[in-house]
Amino acid sequence: MTRFIKPVASAILSLAIVAGAAMPAFAQDGGNTSARANDRVDLRPKFRTGDQTRFTMDLNITSTQQAGEAGAVAQTVKQTLGLALKVKEAKADGTAKLEMVYESIKLEATSPLMTMTFDSSQPKDKDDPTGQLLRPLVGLTLALETDERGSITKVTPQVPAGPAGAAVPTNLLEQFTAADVVKGLFGPILSISAGSGFAKVGESWVNESTMQGSLGNMSLKNTYTLRSHEGGNAILDINGTVDLASAPNGGLADIKDGSIKGTANWDTKAGMLKSMEMTQRMQVATRVGDQSTSSTQDMTVRVQRK
């Protein structure tokens, strides 16, 4: 069954990398934010105890790998996550305790070697190996803590006890529960503001961060620009680059083209993301020992609040 794990884990990691690009770095700002609220857009999150909001997150990946005499190998992955965000406690200082629940999972992965499909809304099939891996993840809850800016500071997975929890291989479970993956997946839903929480139309800020990916430590640098604000909708443009800081196991890899582009619609009345669409393109050359490969990967991530 382990042969089914790699495509699923790869899809989750890829989603975390491109979604993580939307997590802004907070520039130091010693000014009085309340005094400037009249001429700046309030991009701060607004959590309210008891609120529950649902999101749909779609991921589409198309990748082509050149592997010497083996020629080109193409693979596509389509994945949809149904998410529920529950505010357990919103404190006066702006910090909050939240729960994020994986309510549904849908996956379709195709390659010359295999096809994987799973839809948690369909009846359980005891003969489906992909379902045996993924179905126990439906209902998985993550307890999150955030600071006053909405940035995730703590992740506590609430893994089911007994056979349900034991049915999921550890390395697959980590792709849904590891802190850096969770921050990359859900950080943009909770926070997209500049350092003070306010920004003027036309203002930009930069994020530089690293994340563990399937190729190694990925270095992300992105610029966010508040394009417009009208009717409670703050539209932000996102432009960035992806590079490889280090590759595992002595591998040598070089990202020839790593670019990220996207837009986000932040609901300033609700203090929450309304929608986001991002695309990432990576052209990678890799050499391990005397083996060399090259690959191209195009990803699109869409998040929509219901």
Image: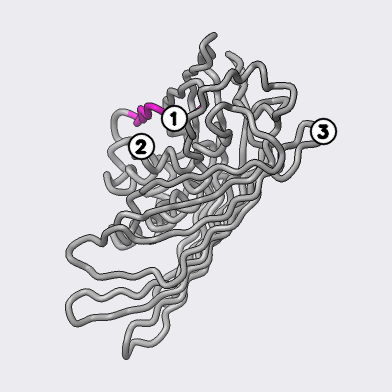
Crowding at label 3, few (<14), some or many (≥20) Cα neighbours within 10 Å?
Answer: few
The quarter of the rendered structure image containing the N terminus is bottom left
Quadrant of the image for the C terminus?
top right
Rendering colour mode: one colour
Closest to the observer, 256 or 56: 256
User: Mark 2 highlights which residue?
Assistant: 179
CA separation in Å, label 1 and label 2: 9 Å
Percent x, y of residue 266:
67, 36
Question: Mark 2 or mark 3, which is nearer the start of the sequence?
Answer: 2
- For the question of whether residue 109 can be seen, the reply is yes
Please give the name of the residue rendered at 59% of the width and 27% of the height, measured from the top-left corner.
197
Q: Earlier in the sequence, mark 1 or mark 2?
A: 1
SS assignment for the magenta stretch, majority: strand
Whole-percent x, y for residue 184 in the image = 45, 43
Q: Residue furthest front?
A: 31
Reading the image, the residue beneath label 3 is 231
Q: What amino acid is labelled 3 in the image?
A: Gly
At horizontal 71% and vertical 45% (from top left) the residue drawn is: 227
Identify the residue at horizontal 67%, vertical 22% (top origin). Answer: 36
- Confirm whether the magenta stretch covers residue 40: no
Query: Mark 3 to mark 2: distance in Å?
Result: 35 Å
Q: Mark 1 = which residue?
A: 152
Residue range highlighted in magenta: 150-160
How crowded pointer 1 is (Cα within 10 Å; few <14, some 14-19, many 20+) is rated as many
Is disc 1 placed on a helix, strand or loop?
Answer: strand
- Foreground mark, 1 or 3, reads 3
Q: Residue shown at 65%/26% (left/top)?
A: 271
Q: Which amino acid, mark 1?
A: Ile
**Relative to 256, is 12 above or below?**
above
